[in-house]
Amino acid sequence: MNKNLENIQVFLCSSGTGKSYLAKHNKNFVDMDIIKTKCHYNLSSELKDDEIESLKSSGNLEINKNYPLNYLNVITAYLKEGKKLLLVPSKLELDYLKENKVDFCLIFPSPDCEEEYFKRFLKRGNSEKFSKEVSARISRFYEENLKIDAKFKIILKKGEFLTDILN
């Protein structure tokens, strides 16, 4: 890992960058997939990551009445433990980090990665509709991310994943 990033605990990473993979293979990182705390799944068994990915656009989700407080409480607890968190950037996370004066690194793909991310989403089990919608926003997200005041910003090139820069 880049020495500048060693003291950073929060990494705001776009969808498809490899948050779940990194967290599975490096126990220093926690994938804070918001969907796991925001929603209740209408299924009785423990869900695997690929099942969660396919549910994200299925409509088979029920909002947790304790959200977003439960999600922010989990983030706070992990930060106190010294964990490194992988989050998807949104207004909720950005406001929380600003309010709590937490430095973060923003990681997002270059605009020329749209087709590659579409394929990544499909490969991990997302629907074609979801994959098209999210990958089509990469250029817009790129422009929005450039405006965010982050301690560090990393733009992923074609073929790059979080493991390439954070492992």
Image (cartoon, rainbow, N blue to C red):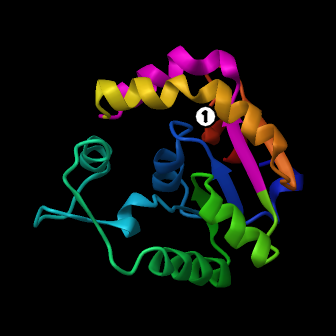
Q: Is residue 131 above or below residue 105?
A: above
Question: What is the number of callouts on the image?
Answer: 1
Residue 31 vertical position relative to residue 124 in the rendered view, above or below? below
Q: Can residue 50 be seen in this view?
A: yes
Which residue is farthest left? 44
User: Residue at the location (32% across, 46% down)?
Assistant: 56
Residue 156 locus on image (x, y percent): 70, 30
The kind of secondary structure the magenta stretch mainly shows is helix
Q: What element carries label 1?
A: loop
Q: Where is residue 104 in the image (x, y as percent from the top left)?
A: 77, 60
Question: Which residue is nearer to you in this view: 68 or 164?
Answer: 68
Instruction: Judge left or right: residue 41 versus residue 132.
Output: left
Quick check: 11 above or below 66?
above
- Residue 55 drawn in magenta: no
Residue indicated by mark 1? 161
Query: In this orientation, does residue 123 appear?
Result: no
Residue at 51% from the left image edge and 36% from the top image edge: 16
Residue 67: quadrant of the picture: bottom left
Q: Which amino acid does label 1 sit on?
A: Phe
Q: Position of residue 57 (x, y in %)?
A: 30, 42
Q: Give the range drawn in magenta.
A: 105-125
Q: Residue at x 74, y 48 (%)?
A: 106
Residue occupying image coordinates x 25% and y 47%: 55
Left or right: 149 in relation to 85: right
* Rendering coords of residue 8 (x, y %): 78, 63
